[in-house]
Image: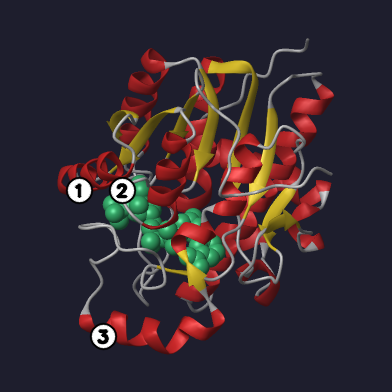
Amino acid sequence: MSRWDPDNLPSQAGKTVVVTGAGRGVGYFVSEQLAASGARVIMTTRDARQRDAAAAAICAEVPAADLEFVTLDLASLASIRDAANQLRALGPIDVLINNAGKTSGSSRRELTADGLEVMVGTNAYGPFALTALLFPALSQRARVVSLGSMATRLTKADIADLQQESGSYSVSKAYAYSKHGMHAFAFELDRRLRAAGSGVQSLLAHPGFALDGSAPRRAGVTDRNSAGRRLLERALRPMAHGKNRGAWPVVRAAIDPDAAGGEFYGPSRSVTGPPVLVSAVPQSAAASFGAEFWRLAEDSTALKFDIPAS
Ligand SMILES: NC(=O)c1ccc[n+]([C@@H]2O[C@H](COP(=O)([O-])OP(=O)(O)OC[C@H]3O[C@@H](n4cnc5c(N)ncnc54)[C@H](OP(=O)(O)O)[C@@H]3O)[C@@H](O)[C@H]2O)c1
C-alpha cells in the first residue's frame, strides 16, 4: 500500500463529491479538505444558517472552492427524495460520502417522519435510501464512503430488533445499532457491486474519537458548542483529536487511488493518528448480517438498489 499524506492530497480537479452533514463536524472538514484538493463539493445541510456559516468558513480557507448546496434531512424519506432529485441534476457524482449522523438523542424512543426509530432511521436507513436513489447518478468508477464507528466494538447488535421495538430503550444502544447498520450497508453494498462486476466501490471509514474543540477554529462551525460541552471536551482532549483529523480516514477512503471496495479506514491508534486500513467487528461485516440488514432497509424505505450487471 502507498504512503498517504493527509496534508498533501492528490488533485481532485474535475471530480464531484457529495458530503452529507457538511455544515459542521467531520463533514465540514471533509468538505474543506476535498475543496482544497480541487474537487467540486456538494454540501448537504439541514439548516440554512449552518450552510451559510460553513460556506463562509470554507471560502475563507479555500478562496477558489467550488461549492454547491442541497438541503437534506435524513430523518425524512420525502426530504431524501427531494435532495436526491437535486443531486442527480448536479451529477455525475464521483464520490458520495454518507457522513451525516445523529450522534446524540433523547433517552425516550423517538421516531423519524416515517415512523422509524430515529437513530437507525437517520443513520442507517436514511443513507441506504439516499444511496439507492443516487445510484443511477454515480459515475462508472464512483466511490460510496459510509461512516462507521468503534461503538460497534462496545455493543453487539440485535438484528432481529434493530429498532428496539421490544424491551427497554437505550439511546447508546440505538446509536451502536445504527452504526452496525452502516457497517452492514457498506460491506453488503461492496459484495453486491463485486457480484455485478460494477466499477463502483463501497468503503467504510471512522474518525476515531474526534472533537470540535481540538480542531482549528472555524467561525460558526467549530465554536457552536455549549459552555458545558466545551468543558467536557477540554477534559477529553488528551484521548482525542480534532474533527479536522477525524476527517482524514474519510478523505483517504474517498480518494486514495490505492484504496479498494470493502476496505475500512480509521486512525492508526484507534482513536487518534494518521489514517490507515483497520478491521471491522466480525458481526456486522458478516454476509448473513449484511443480507438481513439489506432486507430490513428495503422494507423500511420501500426502495431497492438497481445495480446493473456489467
Ligand atoms: N466524532 C466522533 O468521534 C465520531 C466517532 C465515530 C463515528 N462518528 C461518525 O462520524 C459522522 C460525523 O460525526 P461528527 O462528530 O461530525 O458529528 P456531529 O458533529 O454531531 O455532526 C453530525 C452531522 O450530521 C448532521 N445530521 C444530524 N442529523 C441529521 C439528519 N437528520 N439529516 C441530515 N443531517 C443530519 C448534522 O447536521 P446539523 O448541523 O443539521 O445537526 C451534522 O452536520 C457521524 O456519522 C458519526 O456517527 C463520529
Image quarter where the N terminus lies is: top right
Mark 3 and mark 1: span between their CA atoms?
Answer: 22 Å
Furthest-top residue in this view: 310
The answer as to whether callout 2 falls within 8 Å of ligand 1 is yes
**181 shown above or below 104:** above
Seen at 79% across and 35% down, the residue is 191
Q: CB under 8 Å between callouts 3 and 1?
A: no
Residue 239, can we see it?
Answer: yes
Type of the residue with mark 2: Gly
Q: Nearer the viewer, mark 1 or mark 2?
A: 1
Q: Which residue is mark 3?
A: 228
Inter-mark Cα distance, 1 to 2: 8 Å
Q: Percent position (x, y) of residue 61? A: 32, 45
Q: From the viewer's perspective, is residue 72 above or below residue 151?
A: above
Residue found at x 76% / y 30% = 192
Regarding residue 165, the answer to whether it shows in the image is no
Q: Which residue is mark 2?
A: 23
Give the quarter of the image for residue 200.
Answer: top right
Amino acid carrying mark 3 in the image: Gly
Count of labels shown? 3
Q: Which residue matches tag 1?
A: 53
Earlier in the chain: of badge 3 and badge 2, it is: 2
- Of the residues under marks 1 and 2, which one precedes in the sequence? 2
The reply to whether the C-beta atoms of the residues labelled 1 and 2 are less than 8 Å apart is yes
Residue in view at x 73 percent, y 40 percent: 188
Q: Residue at x 41, y 72 (%)?
A: 214
